[in-house]
Image (cartoon, rainbow, N blue to C red):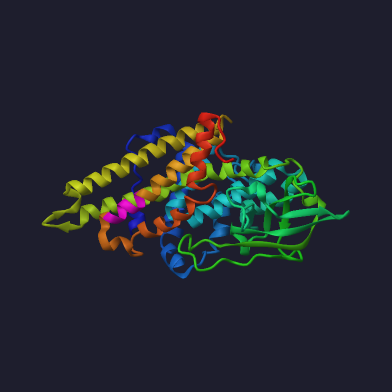
Amino acid sequence: MASIQYKHPDYFNVDDLFTDEHKLIRDSIRDWVNRRVKPIIDEACQKHEFPAYLTKELGEIGAFGPYIPEKYGGAGLDQISYGLIMQELERGDSAVRSAASVQSSLVMYPIFKFGSEEQRLKYLPLLASGEKVGAFGLTEPNHGSDPGGMKTKFIDKGDHFLLNGAKMWITNASNADVCVVWAKDEKGVVKGLIVEKGMPGFTAPETHNKWSLRASITGELVFDNVKVPKENLLPGVKGLKGPLMCLNSARYGIAWGVIGAACDCYDAALRYSLERKQFNKPIGGFQLTQKKLAEILTEITKAQLLAWRLGTLRNNDKATPAQISMAKRNNVEMALKIARDSRQILGAMGITGDFPMMRHMMNLESVITYEGTHDIHLLITGMDITGINAFL
């Protein structure tokens, strides 16, 4: 019932900045989340399971690669449409948004941007429809924020490449059919390879016992002398530029997505504050509760305007990686604080699965770390404004 009653906060009439098409896309995804995600997501988290049947449905509603051209199975939408889709999916749960974000920005995007025409036609339509699941292999057990130190490598064996190494903290790992894996060649140059499920020597054990993103599949990608056909090399990019461009797209989606989680927490807290009575009046009538609600709405509004502006820059190919980093860092921190503050409004009730705060809070502890940690994004901004590299 709560999902049906949901009222999206829009204190500064941000809706006026969207086209009718934007609003139609957003509302259709919102309706799907209300019907298909909200009723089942708490149980999925409690059971530590990803509702796999949602994958095909995500393809059917156009959540996979929405900005990919129609020729390759996408919808050819703009970047604001993509952002709004991510916002509504994460209102349901970060696990659902992560599945769509990885498929779109970390698998379909590099194949579209750096792949051959044959690779695009072979993989993109199947990924767009949800018939195939994708994963992105960059992070390693000993190399997270410093991907340039990766140990995964491949050598040229004449008629194929031989791939060895391991990747860790990979969304969709154990159920992925197609993996875009970044590894170093014999000269130490980072390149992308398309690795498919079933290739001998390729295994993907799942990571268990997580307190965060419990409805998301996380695992490893392990390569033990995996023979990769030469036609599976992404020909259009060399070096870390490739994976970092993918991460920029994913981080942009996160900057929008976490707004959905924050809005879900705010809506539940506001509704509760008007219904819950103490000392003979609704707790929403007390000054400290109003302070929390007012501050939460202010931060959501700032994040909405930041994401919209970043989307307009992305649409015009003017958004810089540093701007994307700032938006990702700010909006995730905002959402995590809002989850905590809104939980306090509900008191003990806020820790139960009847309300979304604790689930979002635990999820956001992962989101604030993946696709670039909170501190790393601060250093990216710092380097951009001072010109001095603090990483070295």
On the picture, is 127 further left or further right than 258?
Answer: right
Which image quadrant for residue 343?
bottom left
Residue 140 on the magenta segment: no
Which image quadrant for residue 68?
top right
Q: Name the residue at the front extreme.
A: 392
Tag count = 0
Q: Is residue 19 visible to the viewer in this orientation of the structure?
A: no
Give the image location of residue 37, x and y in percent.
Answer: 45, 59
Magenta stretch: dominant secondary structure: helix
On the picture, is 245 further left or further right than 379?
Answer: right
Residue 341 on the magenta segment: yes
Q: Which residues make up the magenta segment?
A: 338-344
Q: Is residue 109 above or below residue 355?
A: above
Tell me the residue at 68%/57% (across/down): 178
Tell me the residue at 59%/44% (across/down): 247
Give the image location of residue 335, x and y in percent.
Answer: 39, 48
